């Protein structure tokens, strides 16, 4: 199977649980992948980046598919992340954006899945990772009906001057 064929395979959401990790406590979270082993690897990589992968082979890890992937899997739950979301909307003058909104950045379609208070977190179609994007750079925002709300692309001439 080629890399392009693999990218077209569906993504799934998995619940990854590491049993008895610290003092009998379980460590659990959500991971996205095309397979159970891909979700397991990504979860370990994202949460234990200073740990050698060979050290994780003795861990008791369960990976359970919880459903099909949805951009909502990335939605923030914590108040801190929500505050950062409101901060980017206000600071960048884009009060119309919402989580899950369709967006096109430099010709690539995706969904807004969060922010870091300065840039948007965008999950581009076909990717399993989030990219950080400037809210004004070559960006087009769409409403739920697929109509353009705001267009910041240079070719259309709707660029904000700073």
Image: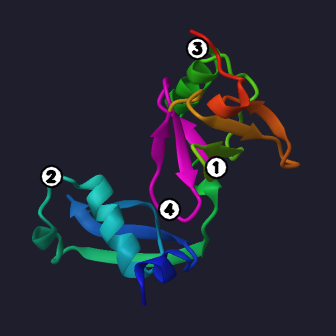
> Relative to 76, is 150 on the left or the right?
right
Q: Is residue 113 above or below residue 13?
A: above
Most foreground residue, 104 or 81: 104
Most foreground residue, 78 or 115: 115
The residue drawn where x is 21% and y is 73% is 59
The residue drawn where x is 41% and y is 77% is 63
> Where does the N terminus fall, quadrant-wise?
bottom left
Q: CA distance from mark 2 to mark 4?
A: 24 Å
Q: Is residue 38 visible?
A: yes
> Any mark on residue 91, and which?
3
Disc 4 element: loop
**Measured from the top left, where is residue 50 in percent x and y?**
15, 52
> Any mark on residue 111, and which?
1
Q: Dot 4 corresponds to which residue?
A: 127
Disc 3 element: helix
Q: CA distance from mark 4 to mark 1?
A: 11 Å
> Relative to 147, is 128 on the left or the right?
left
How many tags in the picture? 4
Say how the picture is coloured: rainbow
Q: Which residues are magenta?
A: 111-133
Q: Dot 2 corresponds to which residue?
A: 50
Q: CA distance from mark 3 to mark 4?
A: 28 Å
Give the mark nearest the N terminus, 3 or 2: 2
Give the mark nearest the N terminus, 2 or 4: 2
């Amino acid at each position: 199977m080629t890399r392009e064929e693999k990218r077209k395979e569906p993504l799934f959401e998995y619940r990854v649980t590491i049993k008895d990790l610290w003092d009998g406590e379980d460590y659990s979270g959500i991971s996205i992948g095309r397979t159970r082993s891909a979700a397991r690897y990504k979860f370990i990589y994202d949460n234990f980046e200073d740990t050698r992968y060979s050290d994780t082979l003795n861990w008791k890890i369960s990976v359970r598919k919880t459903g099909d992937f949805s951009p909502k899997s990335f939605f923030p739950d914590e108040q801190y992340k929500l505050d950062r979301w409101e901060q980017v909307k206000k600071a960048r003058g884009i009060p119309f954006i919402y989580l899950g909104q369709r967006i096109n950045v430099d010709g690539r379609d995706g969904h807004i899945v969060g922010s870091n208070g300065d840039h948007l977190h965008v999950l581009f179609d076909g990717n399993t990772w989030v990219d950080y994007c400037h809210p004004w750079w070559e960006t087009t925002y769409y409403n739920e009906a697929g109509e353009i709300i705001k267009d910041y692309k240079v070719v259309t001439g709707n660029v904000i001057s700073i």
